[in-house]
Amino acid sequence: MALARFLQVSDLHLGRPFAWLPGDRREERRRDQQRALELCVSQAIERGVHGILVPGDVFDSTQVDAALLTFAIKVFGVNGCPPVYVAPGNHDPASQDNAAWNARLLQARGIAWPDHVHVFDSPEWTSKPVPRLPGVRVWGRCFTSGVESTDRPLASHLLAPVTGTDPMGFEIALFHGSREGQCPPAQKMTAPFSDAEVASSPFVYHAVGHYHAPSRIEQPLTEGVKSAGARLAYAGSAVALDYTETGSHGAVEVRIEYGHRLPFVEVEPIELDRRRVCVVTTDVGGAASADQIDRRILKALDVVGAGEMDFASVTLTGRLPAGVRWTGPGADLRNRVFHLRWDASALRPDYDLSRYREGEGKTTEERFARELLAQMDAATDPAARAELERALFHGLDAFKLREVSPAWEEVAG
């Protein structure tokens, strides 16, 4: 039996603006991306893989600045780096104006990709042999513009060029595309394919980019299949790019046993992102001060293991005693993690609304509350109902506390 080993990484999105972060944090996060790429190559060298598979979106756009492009070229050019196979995606397509993949524009800048880096710059399937693995080929296709594509990369008529497989080798697919039925809410379908197309394709393994959460398609050992084990895998984004991207992020090592039996494929996650996105919901009901609310949040962060290197997204719930206000975290809480996002829109004052519903409306306060409650009950639009609820709470604050502050607005940060 022979063993082929690859490291698969995609969706680095180098050059991402990270506009949702403060200025100093944006720069630090961009450095995290660069460290992830450096770690990817060092892991490939350390593990002795036969090649690095990059199915798209190395860069966040076609407007790649010279410093970032030089950095990526130098990282892949370090001594010992194995062959690199790149299939540009919809964010960094192999278009005429993208200097990252255009040899003429690269030459004008006085730089070039190392000889062992192969860029698939055609939307048609083309192949490149893998050195040290006789009979093994990587087949790739690319995006040539950032427009969503309806082409089905695994449709039988598009796979016509995939011929001449060596009986002692195998074929790998490298592309950027969307698995149907699995598209995350924040992403768009482009270059779609079905599980059935994966099952019937001529490839032993499919290295795919575009989705930012790691996933795979497992194939049991049955008659007529090209391989068993992992037929396809998304490595996911190399680092988390926003608060929706929870969990571990990085690359995967792909191991393919082949030779005297049906190829069997395993994938092993490799963590590249030193930060995590932690999401917590915390009930702060009954807290008597803003500091007590902060302490409950700190405890919740301890429970999920959020550290000073991590991102934390906190949703607050519960009813607060009259007069208690929380408009944002204090210094200790802010410094607890790398970046904190909070949503306090679900907090409510602890007013007994049933008393107003059941009362006779003798006072101005009671008549005001009963009128707003009646309008809320009649409202069919959730947004209108929420606006009426906020008006009710502000009014009751005015009656009871003799003050009105924007505590019950959509407070988030």
Image: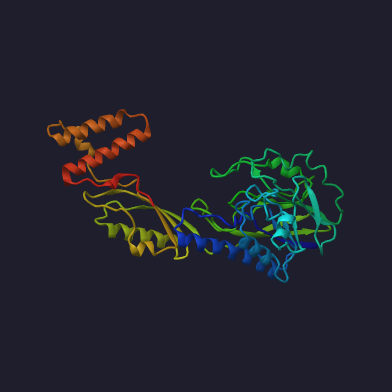
Q: Quadrant of the N terminus?
A: bottom right
Q: Is residue 408 left or right of residue 274?
A: left
**Image x and y of residue 85, in percent:** 73, 57
> Which x, y percent locates residue 379?
33, 29
User: In the image shown, does 261 or 213 lie closer to the viewer?
Assistant: 213
Query: Along the line of sight, which residue is nearer the eye, 71 or 401?
Result: 71
User: In front: 17, or 270?
Assistant: 17
Q: Residue at x 24, y 42 (%)?
A: 394
Instruction: State the image quarter where residue 32 is shown.
Output: bottom right
Q: Position of residue 191 (x, y in %)?
A: 67, 42
Q: Is residue 385 above or below residue 339?
A: above
Q: Is residue 172 left or right of residue 183?
A: right
Count of residue discs: 0
Q: Position of residue 257 (x, y in %)?
A: 77, 59
Above-or-below relation of 1 to 386: below
Residue 74 shows in the view:
yes
Q: Is residue 269 visible?
A: no
